[in-house]
Image: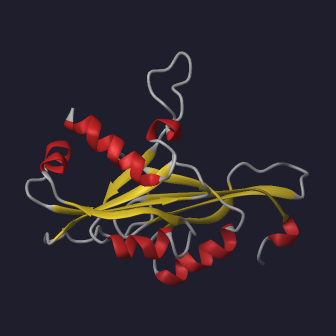
Amino acid sequence: MKRALLICILFSLWGSAPASAQIPDIPDGFSVTPLMRSTHFVRDVDESLKLYRDILGLRIRFEQTFKSEEWDDILGIGDKTTRVVHLQSGDFVFANVAFFQFLGDTQPPAPEPRTFVKTGDAALVFVTNDIFRINEQVKAAGYAIVSEPIVLFPKEGSDAQSYESLFFDRDGILVNLTQFNVPSSQVPK
């Protein structure tokens, strides 16, 4: 019951519509909704915001700190204060990204930068209309790049190609960007 109450409180804080009106329907033949949110436990929310808000352009939908028995019950974290930031693109209340940081904790060291993926990695996948500008900002900020924008599936004889890039954020979360049908005139030389 406590968990259900906590979930309803979180949804109701997200917007003015009732929580139940914001949750997508469970499609026929399925047991769950489309992905509501991908939540990541990070060392420093402010550092995460430098990428996801400042470079990728997501907007803060919800930000608050929590410390309660209910948070301990659902996360198993003891008596910790948790900073929570939910980010969104557009007005959607689903398919968002959230970052949780345990305040006052000694954080683990940053993962070693690497330029390859391995089993156990997970990627946040976004479609963009500005992959080359974002790539330049990601490089300038020193994120570990696995692949700068490349044509993954060439379309023979087409002037427009789709590009993908892949890089790690500061906590080792992969970010995959895709831009569809980029005319050759828009590809940097």
Q: Quadrant of the C terminus?
A: bottom right
User: Quick check: can you spot residue 104?
Assistant: yes
Q: Nearer the viewer, residue 44 or 79?
A: 79
On the image, the x and y values in percent for residue 123 come to 46, 52
Check the image and report above or below for 21 versus 39: above
Q: Residue at x 49, y 31 (%)?
A: 33
- Whether residue 113 sits left or right of residue 97 in the image: it is left
Where is residue 163, by image quadrant? Answer: bottom right
Q: Residue at x 56, y 23 (%)?
A: 27
- Whether residue 46 sits left or right of residue 21 in the image: it is left
On the image, the x and y values in percent for residue 128 come to 67, 60
User: Quick check: can you spot residue 143?
Assistant: no
Where is residue 107, by image quadrant? Answer: bottom left
Chosen colour scheme: secondary structure
Where is residue 186, by image quadrant? Answer: bottom right
State the residue lying farthest toward the top: 29
On the image, the x and y values in percent for residue 133 come to 67, 76
Check the image and report above or below for 55 versus 150: below
Q: Quadrant of the N terminus?
A: top left
Q: Nearer the viewer, residue 186 or 72?
A: 72
Q: Residue at x 77, y 51 (%)?
A: 154
State the residue lying farthest toward the bottom: 140
State the residue lying farthest toward the left: 78
- Whether residue 35 sits left or right of residue 8 in the image: it is right
Check the image and report above or below for 122 versus 179: above
